[in-house]
Image: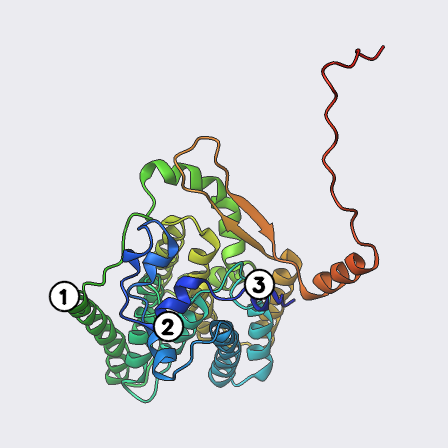
């Protein structure tokens, strides 16, 4: 079920400052460990809004909403085209709407939904060169996309094509996007001095604290989507395409590992979403039975619905008493009911209990 927490949290001040001046060095005003300083080279969204003259506090929220709706529309339409079955596309959208990425329930606004939409758009096959644009923009939206964009590259390399030329045009487009993004990143840093601080990256000491979330991170990174990953790997293995199965497994493991390179575990692991989409495409290619396709997609959506969703965050402070937290993302009906109950039965104001007077005689 969707959650409307995205409407309740306006963009942070650092985001608004970056939209007002995309070339502003955020490290001048924020410490390297602060989130705002890491916005320096995440330029796709601020540059676009700045060129459009949009700097309203709610602008980023609207962009995030449109990006999630774009993810729904793109993935559903793409899978329908590939499978020739509208039900398959609709069921994947229902699955996506139950995940951290697709339910509008993030604890604060960021560029992740935009980056993921652009990465998923990189799976497009035609016209040649269009996926270069989408992946290039994704890599300039958030650094996490540098690993996530390997999934469209992998898909273009392993999928069945009519001619080798088609394969290398699509895969080459993604590789070209990587080359252009890296080259322009060095150029922008040389010209403007903008850099991304690395002080927030997890050290070995911090990793030990974050790994307490490894099990729940695995479960809630893809939820029912893990069934798609497993189905794609097993079908590829039994079909004799073992390099496909092994390569995809390694790539998923790599993306999962990056989920623990910073404290905001849920945000990092949300970049596994292209893995679920890639797995769905591979599954459709390997499983010709229409009813089997529908059954698995239905199970994936139902499992994700039953699991609900949680935000996972691990503190990185070098304090042995510091703890991370896991918070339930409440579905919209729960939010509505809770709000109605609070208005009908407001909680009594908290009053601090009075302290006994030391001069009073002790009670019997």
Q: Which numbered disc flags the more N-terminal residue, 1 or 3?
A: 3
Left-right relation of 107 to 139: right
Indicate the position of residue 179 as horizontal and vertical percent values: 19, 71
* Residue indicated by mark 2: 19
Mark 2 to mark 1 CA distance (whole Å): 21 Å
Q: Residue at x 46, y 62 (%)?
A: 12
Cβ atoms under marks 1 and 3 closer than 8 Å = no
Picture mark count: 3
Residue at the bottom extreme of this rendering: 127
Mark carried by residue 87: none
Q: Residue at x 74, y 21 (%)?
A: 356
Q: Is residue 279 above or below residue 84?
A: above
Q: Is residue 192 above or below residue 75?
A: above
* Residue indicated by mark 3: 105
Residue 8 vs residue 330, the one in the foreground: 8
Can residue 232 be seen in this snapshot? no
Indicate the position of residue 54 as horizontal and vertical percent values: 42, 80
Left-right relation of 138 to 64: left
* Residue indicated by mark 1: 190
Residue 175 vs residue 84, the one in the foreground: 175
Mark 1 to mark 3 CA distance (whole Å): 38 Å
């Amino acid at each position: 079920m969707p959650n409307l927490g995205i409407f309740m949290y306006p963009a942070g001040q650092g985001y608004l400052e970056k939209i007002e001046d995309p070339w502003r060095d955020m490290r001048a005003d924020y410490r390297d460990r602060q989130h705002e300083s890491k916005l320096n080279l995440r330029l796709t969204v601020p540059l676009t809004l700045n060129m459009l003259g949009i700097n309203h506090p709610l602008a980023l929220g609207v962009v995030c909403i449109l990006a999630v709706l774009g993810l729904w529309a793109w993935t559903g339409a793409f899978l329908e085209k590939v499978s020739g079955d509208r039900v398959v596309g609709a069921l994947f959208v229902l699955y996506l709407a139950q995940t951290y990425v697709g339910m509008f329930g993030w604890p604060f606004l960021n560029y992740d939904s935009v980056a993921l939409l652009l990465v998923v758009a990189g799976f497009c096959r035609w016209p040649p060169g269009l996926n270069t644009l989408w992946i290039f923009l994704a890599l300039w939206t958030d650094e996490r996309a540098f690993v996530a964009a390997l999934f469209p590259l992998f898909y273009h390399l392993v999928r069945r094509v009519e001619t080798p030329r088609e394969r290398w045009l699509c895969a080459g487009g993604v590789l070209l996007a990587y080359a252009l993004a890296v080259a322009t990143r060095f150029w922008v840093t040389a010209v403007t001095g903008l850099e991304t601080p690395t002080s927030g990256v997890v050290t070995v000491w911090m990793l030990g604290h974050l790994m307490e979330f490894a099990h729940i991170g695995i479960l809630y990174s893809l939820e029912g989507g893990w069934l798609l990953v497993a189905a794609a790997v097993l079908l590829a293995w039994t079909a004799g395409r073992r390099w496909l199965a092994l390569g995809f497994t390694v790539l998923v493991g790599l993306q999962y590992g990056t989920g623990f390179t910073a404290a905001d575990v849920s945000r990092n692991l949300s970049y596994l979403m292209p893995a679920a989409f890639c797995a769905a495409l591979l599954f459709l290619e390997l499983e010709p039975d229409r009813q089997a396709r529908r059954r698995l997609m239905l199970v994936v959506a139902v499992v994700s619905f039953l699991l609900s969703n949680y935000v996972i965050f691990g503190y990185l402070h070098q304090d042995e008493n510091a703890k991370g937290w896991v918070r339930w993302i409440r579905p919209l009906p729960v939010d509505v009911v809770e709000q109605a109950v609070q208005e009908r039965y407001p909680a009594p104001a908290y009053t601090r209990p009075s302290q006994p007077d030391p001069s009073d005689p002790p009670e019997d």
